[in-house]
Amino acid sequence: MTAELIDGKKISQEIRKGLEKEVAELTAKGMKPGLAVILVGDNPASRTYVTSKQKSCRAIGMESVLIEYPADVSEKELLDKITELNADDSIHGILVQLPIPPHISETKVIETISPEKDVDGFHPINIGKMMTGQDTFLPCTPFGVMEMLKYIGINPEGKHAVIIGRSNIVGKPMGQLLLNENATVTYCHSRTSDLQSFTKQADILVAAVGRAKMVKAEHIKQGAVIIDVGMNKDEHGKLCGDVDFEDVKDKAAYLTPVPGGVGPMTITMLLYNTVKSAQNRLNDRNGN
Ligand SMILES: Nc1nc(=O)c2c([nH]1)NC[C@@H]1CN(c3ccc(C(=O)N[C@@H](CCC(=O)O)C(=O)O)cc3)C=[N+]21
């Protein structure tokens, strides 16, 4: 093993310690940060993630409210609840756990959440602000990856960053955040021909495709930074990433594990965004 592990759990702990202090200060000023999570249906994986988000909120002194609906809830009922939460002063962040059932429009759900409470950073207004480099809520997974790079002292400027995957919630914003930090960015996806010719050029390779262990040693450059956003089950039903850890670990310079890499960072940045939202409200109240 030559690659150094990027320990998402440890980095998360350090960031959360700082957040805990901010939460205490905000609470003392009557602005205790509160997150509302809406869960539709009873997908066990979604429930696990949502429970983990709630625990993480409470561990740093934040308020966390879980609102659950059966899978057949109407779109109107869900949108009405979001509208109610938009007006609730005790709630600073609203997260609707994705995916949601197909009879409900994901676009409508995302666009109903007030941009000021959109701690996922999925609202088109916030995406537009991210693209133009304005201060806003950054999508939690790509934001977490940027924090990991900062932590290990990797400045993306001038580096070739290659993203595999172009989802709205990970791949696309990941490339944008790296571009904002002056990386040269290449997006690869399911229609890319000769994937390896691109990934082999990557100084920073981000795998966000959702295919278990697809990135092998032959795909990467010696000494590359490898970020694994994948959350898959392997042949034994064990959680694994998009990167074949064993295969690349002697060739990469830095490598994120799954679990314990990007996952915990995603939750940490959700907490960060919610605290930031509460701080914004306090600033409004004080007229700054
Ligand atoms: N509106 C919305 N926002 C999201 O941010 C969102 C979502 N919907 N839907 C589902 C995905 C998935 N997601 C994860 C976050 C943390 C871990 C995580 O902490 N994983 C642990 C391990 C968990 C385990 O052991 O199963 C780790 O990687 O170490 C995983 C998955 C957020 N998501």
Image (cartoon, grey):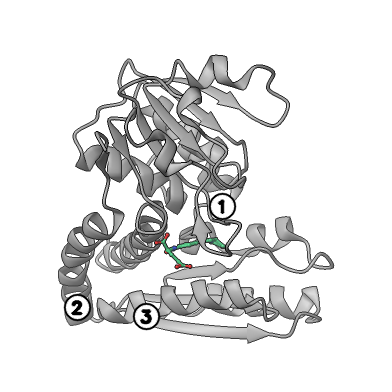
Q: Which callout, 3 or 1, points at the residue further toward the start of the chain? A: 3
> Does dot 1 land on a helix, a strand or a loop?
loop
Q: Quadrant of the C terminus?
A: bottom left
> Does dot 2 land on a helix, a strand or a loop?
loop
Disc 2 marks a residue whose amino acid type is Lys
Q: In this orientation, does residue 91 appear?
A: no
Percent position of residue 179, x then y? 42, 25
* 191 to the left or right of 163: right
Identity of the residue drawn at 20% across and 71% down: 20
Q: Which callout, 2 or 3, points at the residue further toward the start of the chain? A: 2
Asked whether 181 or 44 is in front, the reply is 44
Identity of the residue drawn at 71% across and 67% down: 100
Identity of the residue drawn at 28% across and 68% down: 282
* 83 to the left or right of 157: right
Disc 3 marks a residue whose amino acid type is Lys
The answer to whether the residue bearing label 3 lies less than 8 angstroms from the nearest atom of ligand 1 is no
> Mark 2 — residue?
29
What is the CA distance from the residue labelled 2 to the residue labelled 1? 29 Å
> Mark 3 — residue?
55
Residue 163 is tagged as none
